[in-house]
Amino acid sequence: MKTLKLTLNKQWFDLIEKGIKTEEYREIKDYWTKRIKEMSLTRLEAFKHFDYVEFTNGYNHKSPQITMECKGIEVGQGKTEWGAVADTQYFVIKLGREVGRQNC
């Protein structure tokens, strides 16, 4: 099982933990492109498969963590109420059900 690990600030972590925020956004930049896209010799690109997304609120080993199913990744515009900038393209990480939590 493959897990994408992401760190969030408290505002967005709390919304995901409560089941309100059902997608997470990452800027389309080299760092995120390398982490979540497959690059092939044929130049056809696809998103890597992740089974889960593990969110951590902070960098401490005792920080709250929640693990969610990953329902896929696509490019699109996010919701401004969930932190996206209007008219901006993002990697949109779709979240499914909660599968675990620690230190919450």
Image (tube, rainbow, N blue to C red):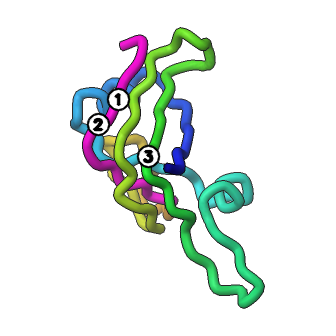
SS for dot 2: strand
Pick whichever of labels 1 and 3 is earlier in the sequence: 3
* Residue assigned mark 3: 52
Q: Amino acid at mark 1?
A: Gly
Q: Residues within 10 Å of mark 2 (few under 14, many from 20)?
A: some
Query: Measured along the vertical axis of the image, is residue 12 above or below residue 38?
Result: above
Q: Position of residue 73 (x, y in %)?
A: 45, 62
* Residue assigned mark 2: 98
From the viewer's perspective, tell me whether residue 96 is left or right of residue 36: left
* Residue assigned mark 1: 100
Question: Which of the 4 quarters of the picture holds residue 98?
Answer: top left
From the viewer's perspective, tell me whether residue 24 is left or right of residue 56: left
Q: Position of residue 34 (x, y in %)?
A: 71, 60
As for residue 102 lying within the magenta part, the answer is: yes
Q: Position of residue 70 (x, y in %)?
A: 39, 52
From the viewer's perspective, tell me whether residue 5 is left or right of residue 51: right
Q: Position of residue 23 (x, y in %)?
A: 35, 49
**Residue at mark 1 to residue at mark 3: CA–CA distance:** 10 Å
The residue shown at (50%, 64%) is 89
Pick whichever of labels 2 and 3 is earlier in the sequence: 3
The residue shown at (62%, 66%) is 37
- Residue closer to the observer: 24 or 77: 24
Q: Amino acid at mark 2?
A: Glu
Instruction: Report the predominant secondary structure element of the magenta stretch.
Output: strand
Q: Which residues are magenta?
A: 91-104
SS for dot 3: strand
